[in-house]
Amino acid sequence: QVLLVESGGGLVQAGDSLRLSCAASGRALSASVMGWFRQAPGMEREFVAAIRWSNEITSYADSMKGRFIISRDNTKNTVDLQMYSPKPEDTAVYCCALDPGAFWIRRLASEYDYWGQGAQVTVSS
């Protein structure tokens, strides 16, 4: 059984940095894509970033490029999302997700089979 557990959410001031982490267990990740999505109140789930586990190729939503960095740790089976200079509009529940067996990075939430429970990130102005 695949289990994804996020940590590191909380309250942060605009301009500060915040790091989210997702610990994965229950499945080999070598042929997978791990992604981060977010959902603000009243909004649809939105792609943030993703990383191909095998060669660390990454993809970002345009509004996150240059501000967020996704990385993975092969020894810990974790995927991190480093948020630099977050803005109040980045306030949302952030979820990590697993697209097992994927070669291409996909941005549709429906393509991902496994999800974490989510971590609230609140950015104050």
Image (cartoon, rainbow, N blue to C red):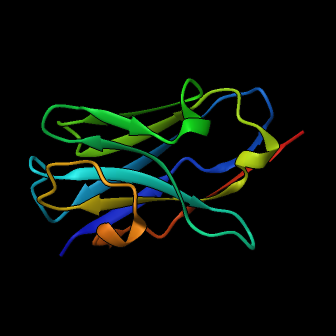
Q: Quadrant of the C terminus?
A: top right
In which quadrant of the rendered view does residue 73 lie? top left
Residue sitting farthest toward the right: 125
Asked whether, in this view, residue 16 is left or right of residue 81, the answer is: right
**Image x and y of residue 13, in percent:** 81, 36
Q: Nearer the viewer, residue 10 or 125?
A: 125
**Image x and y of residue 53, in percent:** 19, 41
Q: How many marks?
A: 0
Q: Residue at x 62, y 38 (%)?
A: 63
In which quadrant of the rendered view does residue 113 lie? bottom left
- The answer to whether 46 is drawn above or below residue 57 in the figure is below
- The answer to whether 29 is drawn above or below residue 71 in the figure is below
Asked whether, in this view, residue 74 is left or right of residue 51, the answer is: left
Q: Residue at x 70, y 63 (%)?
A: 40
Q: Quadrant of the N terminus?
A: bottom left
**Image x and y of residue 47, in percent:** 49, 54
Asked whether, in this view, residue 92 is left or right of residue 59, the answer is: right
Q: Nearer the viewer, residue 10 or 58?
A: 58
Q: Residue at x 31, y 54 (%)?
A: 106
Q: Residue at x 41, y 66 (%)?
A: 109
